[in-house]
Image (cartoon, rainbow, N blue to C red):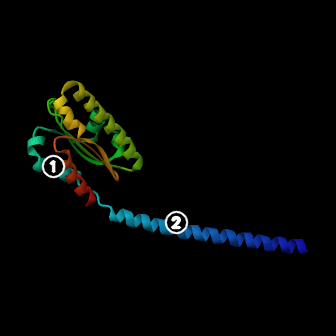
Amino acid sequence: MMKKVLAVMMMAMVMLCVAGCSEKNTDNTTENAQNTNQTVSQTKTADLKTVLSDINTKYADVTGNLRELTDTTELEKYYSVPAGAVKSFAAEIGSDTNAPVEIILIEANDSDSVTQIKQKLDMRYNSVYSIYASYSAEQLDTVKACKVEVNGNYVTLVIAPDYDGIMEIVNKAIAG
């Protein structure tokens, strides 16, 4: 009889411990969900088409002869960026081989997509770099000053004169 009472008491203690732990985890889960909701509500989505328009307004001499990419199939065609990884984008590319100009602004769906998109845009940057390294030392300086950047869920590839000025416009828009 004593063993049964002891077993019941031990079982009750184990259940109290489990109940206490699960209640604490529920509180943490609720708190984490609230924190995530606050972070999401504080994050603004930049209108990338407007950002690109602002760049075109300020740098019309650089961006005047660019061709706009209008849908994700073109991103996939020219940059191998999977359409499913893209939440929104704005892009223009130049066809003048004497002056490399490409402005690719992409908002990825999630962090996995960011990694995937960055990898594809890095490949494109390296390709452009290789072309101008063997073709035009003068234009290579422009390419060297540029890079692929990640800012949250945004991935950008800007290859253009005044890279810093263009990225200032981009980063200001992303920051909200």
C-alpha separation, residue under disc 1 versus residue under disc 2: 43 Å
Label 2 near label 1: C-beta < 8 Å?
A: no
- Image quadrant for the N terminus? bottom right
Q: Residue at x 66, y 71 (%)?
A: 19
In the rendering, at what x and y percent does residue 96 appear? 14, 31
Which residue position holds label 2? 29
Residue at image x 16%, y 45%? 162
Report the side of 102 relative to 84 (left or right): left
Q: Nearer the viewer, residue 160 or 152?
A: 160
Res 55 label: 1
Q: Residue at the location (81% across, 72% down)?
A: 8
The answer to whether 89 is drawn above or below residue 176 in the figure is: above
At a point 43% along the width and 67% down the height, the residue shown is 35
Residue 46 shows in the view:
no
- Where, quadrant-wise, is the C terminus in this rendering? bottom left
Secondary structure beneath disc 2? helix
Query: Element type at marker 1?
Result: helix
Q: Is residue 9 left or right of residue 84?
A: right
Give percent across and percent down for residue 151: 32, 52
